[in-house]
Amino acid sequence: MNKSELIKRMSDRLDQLTSRDVDLAVHAIIEIMSDSLAAGDRIEIRGFGTFSNHYRKPRSVRNPKTGEVGIHKAGKYVPHFKPGKELKRRVDESRLADEPSYTSATRTESNHTTTTNG
């Protein structure tokens, strides 16, 4: 889903608001969240997840095109999202519902490989 699809779905669900109102609200939320992350703040939405900044250390990299080694890449902060328990549960349940033959026993068995000689 992209931003315009989100706005469309919200407009369909919220009959009392115009499409323009929803559009302004979505843009305002995204702008406020972006500003908060840029300022180094953490955003926690209970049941949904947490947005924060993670620091990536400086490192040496290799240019794959030229093969040049030892190029220094500076450290930087990158946005990070950690889903909440409720979101994880809902996603897991919806994915399990899509796979009717999938059971916890099947999941356990698929995580272990066995070999037979013969």
Image (spheres, rainbow, N blue to C red):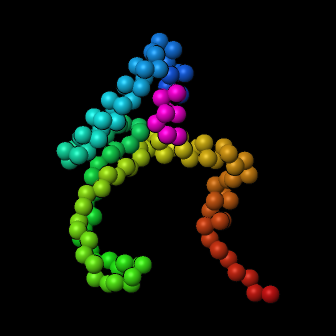
Name of the residue lying farthest toward the front: 66
Q: Residue at x 46, y 40 (%)?
A: 86
Image location (x, y in percent) of residue 102? 69, 53
Q: Nearer the viewer, residue 108 or 73?
A: 73
| Magenta residue check for 6 | yes
Magenta residues?
1-8
What residue do we see at 51% from left, 14% from top? 15
Q: Is residue 28 above or below residue 55?
A: above
List x then y, in percent, for residue 19.
Answer: 47, 20
Q: Main secondary structure of the magenta part?
A: helix
- Residue extending furthest toward the left: 39
Query: Compared to 62, does 5 lie above or below?
Result: above
- Asked whether, in this view, residue 88 is left or right of residue 76, the answer is right
Q: Residue at x 62, y 62 (%)?
A: 108
Residue 43 shows in this picture: no
Position of residue 56 relative to residue 7, above or below, is: below
Which residue occupies the extreme right position in the image?
A: 118
